[in-house]
Image (spheres, grey):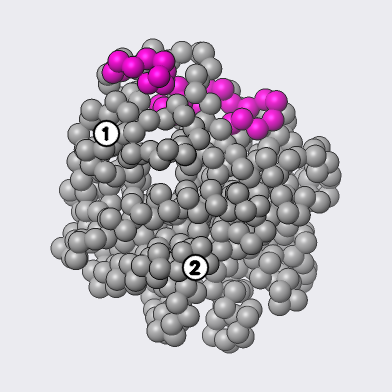
Amino acid sequence: MALLSTLPSLACLLLLAMALRPSSGGGSHDYGEALSKSILFFEGQRSGQLPADQRLKWRGDSGLSDGAEAGFGFPMAFTATMLAWSVVEFGGIMPPEDLRHSLTALRWATDYLLKTIAHPDRVYVQVGDPLKDHNCWERPEDMDTPRTVYSVTPDRPGSEVAGETAAALAAASMAFREADATYAERLLRGATTTFEFADSYKGAYSDDTGLKAGVCPFYCDFDGYQDELLWSAAWLRRASANVSFLSYIQNNGKTLGADDNINEFGWDNKHAGINVLISKEFLEGEVLWLQSYKQSADSFMCTLVPESSSPHIEFTPGGLIYKPGGSNMQHVTSIAFLLLAYADYLARSSRTVDCGGVAVDPSSLRRLAKQQVDYLLGDNPMGMSYMVGYGESYPQRIHHRGSSLPAKADRPEQIGCKEGSPYFNSQAPNPNILVGAVVGGPGEDDAYGDDRPDFRKSEPTTYINAPLVGVLAYFAANPS
């Protein structure tokens, strides 16, 4: 999952030219519209009994027998963390209606996460058999595949998923502090006990034979559980202001890989996010031993800055951050969020990024983030918005079962496991528009085929949208 790749010097010069070139959109995007739609997307991902104010009416109740949100616990917890961080950093500049809907989306996830930790010494991490589930193309309302329940326990540990759950609950406690103080306290208590569980029973869930069958190959833990322990401790420190978590970071940071300086951030590897998050504490409090985290955060930022002599993260010819593999927009939105959050931390403390003698100020980091979000919204060689429902041209055949199959209102009878295959293979546009969904995006050549079976490019995910909420909130309030 590593993001870092070394570009030749010619490519670095091309990147510099791109950075200095004005975006083709000229600041013409309606970031407020995009923000509202990015939040609306989460209503298309809901499972369980839907509320009366559900806005995407083509979705119906689903998964009622198990009462669990569809999806996998590890990436979903990361989604909750990033949606909460979006609110914590940028909720204050969101329009009230968008903030309300953001908190509603977040609470849908955290209510579920609280249920997963309700039993002592056990964290439920997944509902459903992923292999059988992926073998079907049917509506969530028609799910008839096994609803197998997976959990981690002291003798079958999963510190990465438990740690990420703790981080999500801690971050969410901050997001809800003003809107619902009682709920915020409940979240913080849950975060603390879940962190203690993750730290007391160390191990990776995909190392266990039984659990591995449930999470692999889709969401294996490739990068170890150590970063999640440090990540959750950092969030608990920020949410609680408890000095014990600062001591934990000081005493365990090196053991947990704080010195690895891995230039990556996503649901499986939190290193760059850890460095940015902990840097805030250094910038505000001048705790000297935390300075190494700012140095590592600076190092990550320098991989994005064309003027820097650092090895650079790969970009497409059109200027999009690119990581080979799939679901590339997850890297774009997560990194754009880190750029903006770090720019704010630096600006408040009148600091810059030191890139080997080149001082990069907060405004430069914000411009880099804006280039990425403008590309996503349509300033790209395809002239296409990669957010469904935004702009004149956007993906029509996304890899999403509920969106691609007829809604219950249009075809009430059950659509069986294989009965959805003709819809999957059809070249017709999806009948139900999943407004706000951001797909995996184009390849390294900036090309996008709008092909439903090509899930690496056409599938939307919650962990793409979650950091984008904060990014769009910033640019809706600061469009130029």
Residue topped by disc 2: 177
Residue drawn at point x = 33 percent, y = 67 percent? 190
What label does residue 255 carry, if any? Answer: none
On the rendered structure, is 356 left or right of 244?
Answer: right
Asked whether 393 falls inside the magenta stretch, the response is yes
> Magenta residues, as a range?
388-415
What label does residue 131 carry, if any? Answer: 1
On the rendered structure, is 205 left or right of 338?
Answer: left
With respect to residue 478, does 232 lie above or below? below
Q: Is residue 160 visible?
A: no
- Residue 146 in the image: state x and y as whole percent: 20, 34
- Residue 129 in the image: state x and y as whole percent: 24, 37
Q: Nearer the viewer, residue 432 or 364?
A: 432
With respect to residue 30, does 445 lie above or below? above
Q: Is residue 253 visible?
A: yes
Residue drawn at point x = 34 percent, y = 33 percent? 61
Circle 1 — which element?
A: helix
- Residue 139 in the image: state x and y as whole percent: 35, 25
- Residue 476 in the image: state x and y as whole percent: 71, 50
Q: Amino acid at mark 2?
A: Arg
On the rendered structure, is 119 left or right of 301?
Answer: left
